[in-house]
Amino acid sequence: MSKRIADAAEAQPASLKAGERPVSETSPDEVGEFEDEYEDEFESEDEIFEAGVDGRPDEEREADEQRDAMDIDKQTFIPGRTKLAPGETLAPDPSTYEMLHTISTPWPCLSFDIVHDTLGDDRKTFPATIYAIAGTQADANRPRENELMVLKLSGLSRMEREGETDSDGDSDEDEESPSDPILESKTIPLGSITNRIRVHQNPPQSRDYSKPSQTIAATMLENSQVLIHDVSAHLASFDVPGTVLSPSTSNPISTLRMHKSEGYALDWSPLQPLGKLLTGDNDGLIYVTTRTEGGGWVTDSRPFVGHSSSVEELQWSPNERNVFASASSDGSVKVWDVRSKSRKPAVDVKISKTDINVMSWSKQTFHLLATGADDGQWAVWDLRHWKPNASSGSSSPQSKPSPVASFGFHTQPITSIEWHPTDDSVIAVSSADNTITLWDLAVELDDEENRDAGVIDVPPQLLFVHYMESVKEIHWQTQMPGTVMATGSNGFGVFKTISV
């Protein structure tokens, strides 16, 4: 949770930048140790007054006053509601995080995806490790420096807390002390900015977790091409010191050129082991590309047509292999069946007057769909209440249905949204207002309870606010409960809160 902190005195340590791991200037052994005020004896009453009005040395008294001033100045920062005064900066509240790290890369990344690894599920020990892929956004004058990055983040340590004990009452002396995270990377030249990148691995029901799975990455580039790479060898090389990758491993296994304009919508089917890919562009066209038994890639010659503006997001149904949804800057969400000969949507609903930027289909409760819009609104919809089109040739969307939940907390466009992988009431949302918020839809408070808590203008479902500059995309690490990874203008952030 971000705090705003006023500069109290020249001796006060500089506030941390939001998202940085707080580092104490004193060692753990020094924290909490103070000079005994009775250790020095004063020979006269004059010496007592010289030491301070309360009989303590000036340094100790001033330090206490400074700490008191800092405690008074700390306030929770609420986006769009809290204003920073001159001399105030944002800093994370360490007591609200179980883990907090930032990792820099040579160029910022607009998009990334987390790779399912063989280290086990439900991991709660530290230091932690995450594997991911990302695509860079190099300077416009240096497009050839753009790369696909295969990443290994290790040494992700737990937040150190003074005096914390484990469940047996013993201190955590056996745990590895906090250290800086380690970023290892393997790169593949791309030559163009990555708009969206997604990983495909064998679906969970057909995956052998004891063996490395083939990992395929689809990268949607600014030049309108879609590149598909097999990054399995790159991932494996992290754990085999001295591995030298052949230059051929950087070659795409397929290059798709059916789009005539760039796009941002990309999704792999979770129910197709070989690989089935959705891509959408700024012309409103949606294509399906399927991997054949022989390893080739075939794109349907006829696109799915229906949006009057750019396709911003695509999501396969988590439980029906032939169904997907699309969201567009025309303000509508459409549901499609790939078996349809007409290539028209089966369901067409207008839900916003502004662009629908992002969308997430719940993997726990299959009839729930979350959307985020350009006006800062995000909402959850019950697809059972969306009526099918009267005819497959209908081009008029339905009037806006009522959402299950809707929030206008964010003040800028929603940039990413994702359901918690195992809890169908928890959602992570990021916004161009430089914040990531975590929500629990199961929480309910009435107005009186809100007033008593002093947060009448804050939705009770809001669990947490994390500050991150120009945050673009967020994902849950599904094997590490409650862990969120995000990308922004200053690199990657990884955090886990004590509230989720």
Image: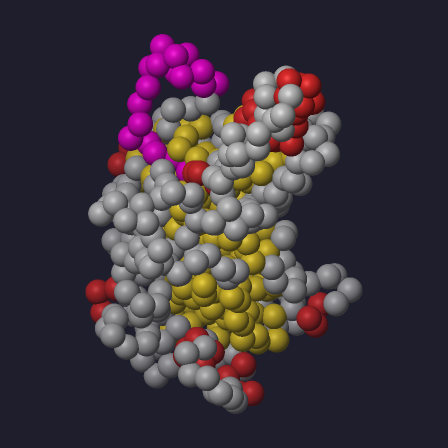
Q: Is residue 477 visible?
A: yes
- Relative to 7, is 332 above or below? below
Outermost residue, right side: 141
Residue 30 in picture, x, y percent from top left: 51, 46
Q: Identify the residue at image location x=66%, y=36%.
A: 12
Q: Is residue 307 visible?
A: no
- Which range is magenta? 438-457
Instruction: Count up the numbered dots.
Output: 0
Residue 327 in picture, x, y percent from top left: 46, 45
Residue 391 in picture, x, y percent from top left: 34, 42
- Relative to 320, is 169 above or below? above
Magenta segment: does it hold 449? yes
For the residue pair 425 and 178, the one nearer the viewer reads as 178
Residue 125 in picture, x, y percent from top left: 32, 58
Outermost residue, top side: 448
Give the quarter of the figure containing the C terminus. Answer: top left
Coloring applied to the structure? secondary structure
Residue 464, by quadrant, is top left
Residue 439, by quadrant, is top left
- Relative to 318, is 498 above or below? above
Q: Identify the residue at image location x=60%, y=59%.
A: 104
Q: Identify the residue at image location x=49%, y=60%.
A: 179
Magenta segment: does it hold 476? no
Q: Identify the residue at image location x=46%, y=22%.
A: 458
